[in-house]
Amino acid sequence: MLDYEEKLKQYMNEHQVKGSHLSFEVSCHSIAQAAEAVNGNSSDFVKNVCMMTSDDQLIVAIVGGEGNASSKKVGKVLGIDRPRLATPEEILKKTGYPCGGTPSFGFSAIFLIDPKVLEKDVIYTGGGSEKSLVKICPSFLQAINQGRIVNIRR
């Protein structure tokens, strides 16, 4: 898992990502586990819901930790058939990071960010492994992943 974390730290360094990479001894796979690790609230986190189009393109729907992404809304926003959830194998292949540690940036995808995410001053996202997180300003996140701000929350 450390290889994935190192890969993300290198990306952050090379692209001057203004955020903090945090590593833990405990799992941060679920929002509850991550909140406990940083002594924060679930509303301080984002979920990166990975979806696939019918032509094998990756979509990352970024929603607040207390929300869920709607594949129906994602399809409508993009003008495509409703995408399906990506499998853990597809997530690793397309992002280079394992499911449960997938960051909100650092790989090629269509990034969609729910507007609620931008209401926070700072958020936590996947840090490359199940035991790491990235603390980052949502507006900077949007700038580096070039995400579209659209209502995709269920």
Image (cartoon, rainbow, N blue to C red):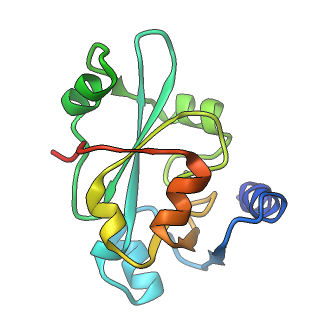
Relative to 13, is 23 above or below? below
Compared to residue 40, the image places residue 6 above or below, namely above
Q: Is residue 39 above or below residue 44?
A: below
Q: Is residue 101 visible?
A: no
Number of marks present in the image shown: 0
Q: Is residue 137 left or right of residue 71?
A: right
- Left or right: residue 100 versus residue 114 is right
Of residue 71 and residue 114, the one placed in the foreground of this image is 114
Residue at 54 percent of width and 28 percent of height: 90
The answer to whether residue 51 shows anywhere in this view is: yes
Query: What residue is drawn where x is 54% and y is 35%?
Result: 91
Please say if 82 is above or below 15.
above
- Quadrant of the image occupied by residue 101: bottom right
Q: Name the quadrant containing residue 13.
A: bottom right
- The structure residue drawn at horizontal position 79% and vertical position 62%, both measured from the top left corner, is 6
Q: Quadrant location of the C terminus? A: top left
Q: Could you say where residue 18 lies in the image, as x and y percent from the top left?
A: 66, 72
Could you tell whether 84 is left or right of 103 in the image?
left
Task: Give the residue at the far left of this rendering.
Answer: 154
